[in-house]
Image: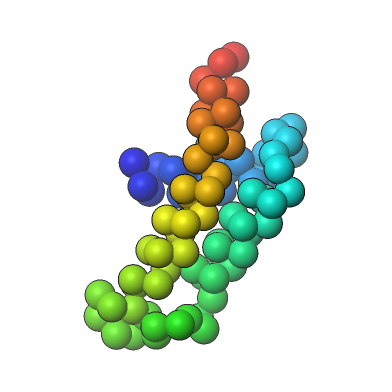
Amino acid sequence: TYVDDLQLAYKMLRDPNFQMATETKTILIIALLYIISPIDLIPDAIPLLGLVDDVLVAGYALRHASAELERYRQTVRTP
């Protein structure tokens, strides 16, 4: 579900019809930029350890946005 939540968060950010708190949107955008950025606290070239910081940042962002994600999940299911 971790990957599903990441994909849902991305869709939620791109959905122009879904309103969310500015703080949540900012945290998700910063987390996404950090994950795709080649500059990391722990370089991705280090096997396994390089992904730890990315996972921690994504986990924090998803935890912070969990209520918004659930609300978005409900709106996507409802036709």
Which residue is the extreme one toward the left?
47
Q: Position of residue 50 (x, y in %)?
A: 33, 78
Instruction: Please say if 43 is above or below 29.
Output: below
Instruction: Please say if 64 is above or below 78.
Output: below
Between 16 and 40, the one nearer to me in the picture: 40
For residue 78, what is the image quadrant? top right
Q: Examine the rendering and report whether any part of residue 8 can be seen.
A: yes
The residue that appears at 66% across and 45% down in the rendered structure is 14
Does residue 15 appear left or right of residue 51 in this picture? right
Instruction: Please say if 45 is above or below 28.
Output: below
Q: Examine the rendering and report whether any part of residue 76 can be seen.
A: no
Of the 4 image quadrants, the one containing the C terminus is top right
The number of callouts visible is 0
Q: Position of residue 25 (x, y in %)?
A: 67, 50
Q: Position of residue 59 (x, y in %)?
A: 42, 56
Instruction: Please say if 56 is above or below 7.
Output: below
Which residue is the extreme one toward the top?
79
Q: Position of residue 64 (x, y in %)?
A: 53, 48
The residue that appears at 40% across and 64% down in the rendered structure is 56
The residue that appears at 25% across and 80% down in the rendered structure is 47
For residue 28, what is the image quadrant? bottom right
What colour scheme governs how the chains and residues are painted in the rendered image of this protein? rainbow
Does residue 37 appear left or right of residue 14 in this picture? left
Of the 4 image quadrants, the one containing the N terminus is top left
Does residue 50 appear left or right of residue 78 in this picture? left
Does residue 24 appear left or right of residue 51 in this picture? right
